[in-house]
Image (tube, rainbow, N blue to C red):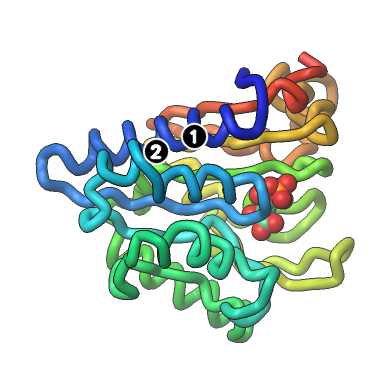
Amino acid sequence: MLPGAEELAVAGADEFARSAGEATRGGGLFRVALAGGSTPRALYRRLTRPPHRGAIRWERILFFWGDERCVPPGEERSNYRMARETLLDPLRIPPRRVFRMKGEEDPARAALAYEDRIRRHVPGRPPRFDLVLLGVGEDGHTASLFPGTAALGETRRLVAENYVPRLREWRVTLTYRALNASRRVIFLVSGAEKAGVAAKIVKKQRGYQALPASGVSPRRGSLLWLLDEAAASAF
Ligand code: 6PG
């Protein structure tokens, strides 16, 4: 538990650097799936500044995403755009190391194409990301796995198109199969509005299984929840 949003960002950046260091020390690549939404902004900005900037071997990182809104990459709501502005552009990461979900395409096609790219660039059967960053919504969704949606039941595919009736929109998302094959998953949660849902999931309170984020549990990996004080206030 961290006092405020800024401390949360620092802790997240420290963990990112530690995971990247472990993967790249021996000359390997680090394959990370980034979170969307607004919480990770501060973490991404942190990573572009000292001391993290100089401590990470950026040239050995491949960037993926946990989910994407079905909008063109230049739109305000694009998760890719958020990461590009806060992280990738400031660090001048070349496009060949950036694997974005194509929110501007037909969702089913974009999901299939993304699965194919993952299979080609992330080793393991099923492919294992070194790190997946995730957020959680007040309704318990994570990535674009929303309560009551079809992608929750997907057991074979790594990436799915997912219609979210409440939002009346399509999303593209990693499935539990991909998330739970990862070496490490970190949830970043900030703000009092997330307190109820965070406590319910982490403390396994009654009804927690109905919340999609509770299904994230890496089989051979680790799971870490980073919360600021407000988000942890219902514990
Ligand atoms: C998205 C997400 C989503 C997000 C949570 C938390 O594309 O919307 O990736 O799962 O992480 O909704 O979002 P905030 O950080 O904005 O609260």
Q: Circle 1 is placed at which residue position?
A: 12
Assign a secondary structure to mark 2. helix
**Left of 114 or right of it: where is 28?**
left
Q: Amino acid at mark 2?
A: Phe
- Marks 2 and 1: CB-CB under 8 Å? yes
The residue closer to the viewer here, 145 or 13, is 13
Which quarter of the figure has residue 73? Answer: bottom right
Local packing at callout 2 (Cα closer than 10 Å; few below 14, some 14-19, many 20+) is: many
The number of callouts visible is 2
168 to 104, vertically: above or below: above
Q: Residue at x 56, y 51 (%)?
A: 35
Q: Circle 2 is placed at which residue position?
A: 16
180 to 122, vertically: above or below: above
Q: Amino acid at mark 1?
A: Gly
Relative image position of residue 225 (x, y in whole percent)? 58, 27
Q: Residue at x 45, y 57 (%)?
A: 87
The residue closer to the viewer here, 57 or 207, is 57
